[in-house]
Amino acid sequence: MAENQNESYETFFRGIWRDNPVFVQVLGMCPMLAVTNSAINAVAMGMATLFVLVGSSFLVSSFKQWIPKQVRISAFIIIIATFVTVADYTLLALVPKVHKELGAFIPLIVANCMILGRQEAFASRNTVRLAVLDAMGMAGGFMVALFSLGAIREILGNGSLFGVDLFGEHFEPWVIMILPPGGFLTLGLILLFFNWVTQQKDKFIEQVAEAERVASDG
Amino acid sequence: MDNLVWIFISSLLINNFVLAYFLGLCPFLGVSNSLETSFRLGLATIFVLLITALCSWFLNTYVLIYAPYLRLISFIVVIASTVQFIEMLIKKLSPALFRAMGIFLPLITTNCAILGLAIFATNRGYGLIEGIVFALGAGIGFTLAMVLLAGLREESELSDIPKLIQGIAMNLIIAGILSMAFMGFAGLFSAV
């Protein structure tokens, strides 16, 4: 039982940090960059993606025995498209303002390669419980990425977070950050930072190994 | 006529699919390492976009007025199968053309630029001619952005760049600068 529990934790947290779909695997870029000009849009997009990913992972892993191998991709896409349609109409009914701002990017969740990728690589091969955990972890990681990008862009480009002013009236907004180029630049810089962290970590591990070798030689 | 010119220029430069709407980023970042490949991918994308414009117009006019909630699913299914069918047709009729762009066709079908075009055209209520002009502008704009990035990347391979920056991070920053340059086109029509 303990081992089982371990596997569940592992499956869940892998998506949030080590295999983060955006920062590590660089998937799902289109919605990622397009809707992150404010934190609230980013969170709404994250919630919609969470719903679609968990729902379709649950269905795909439940029906995996009955989906013929030759048409599995088409079947996955139709399942995903169904959930996206549900999410689209739900957002339209509950938060029409956010729905209007996200516009065409809600239906475009279908084309998010991260979602199809999880169905093909994980949900169609694992039990329902693991598939749902994996979907929650991956969507969580996606949401973390969306939120950090949205927050950075909104703070720099508009001087606010969730629409609350942060800096007072003397702040000169850096408008380029909420325009399209800001999306590319911010994500590029975040990835650069991740590269740097990985490089430092590798260097550190190397140094430790070197020190150990010297110590054992001595 | 003015309207059509406006749609074309707007989707080609001002609201470039890649650099302003972030559509089709996967091939834009993934395949843009050689000039020739990206040009051929661009041609294949223009072709699929034209088919998409036709399909979505047909669906919107004859089918979806009865069942609007099936929009997304029917777009995907119809576009994917039409492209598959045309791919087989090209393979049969013109092997040379198939070799030039055939391998890209199935890859492009689930690209968000394709679906994005269908959804944008529907939301804006474009008719058949407007839809085709929109597809042409968007496709040429996509090819333009793709070829520009590929050219810059080929150039950058010859220069001495720190190892840290190489790879996807650098491509994103290059794309950001390109996108900034394309923002300049926004002033193109306000003067008129």
Image (cartoon, rainbow, N blue to C red):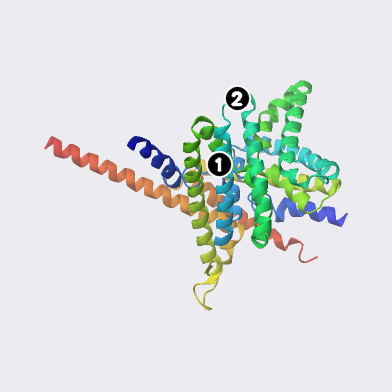
Is residue A93 visible from the viewing direction of this image? yes
Q: Give me the chain letter of mark 2.
A: A
- Provide residue A193's location: percent of width, then percent of height: 42, 52
Identified by mark 1, the residue type is Met
* Label 1 and label 2 in one chain: yes
Residue B87 drawn above or below residue B173: above
Identified by mark 2, the residue type is Lys
Q: Is residue B51 left or right of residue A15?
A: right
Residue under label 2:
A69
- Between disc 1 and disc 2, whose residue precedes? 2
Residue under label 1:
A114
Is A112 or B184 nearer to us in this picture?
A: A112
The quarter in which the N terminus of chain A is drawn is top left
Q: Residue furthest left?
A: A218
Q: Is residue B32 left or right of residue B16?
A: left
Residue B101 drawn above or below residue A178: above
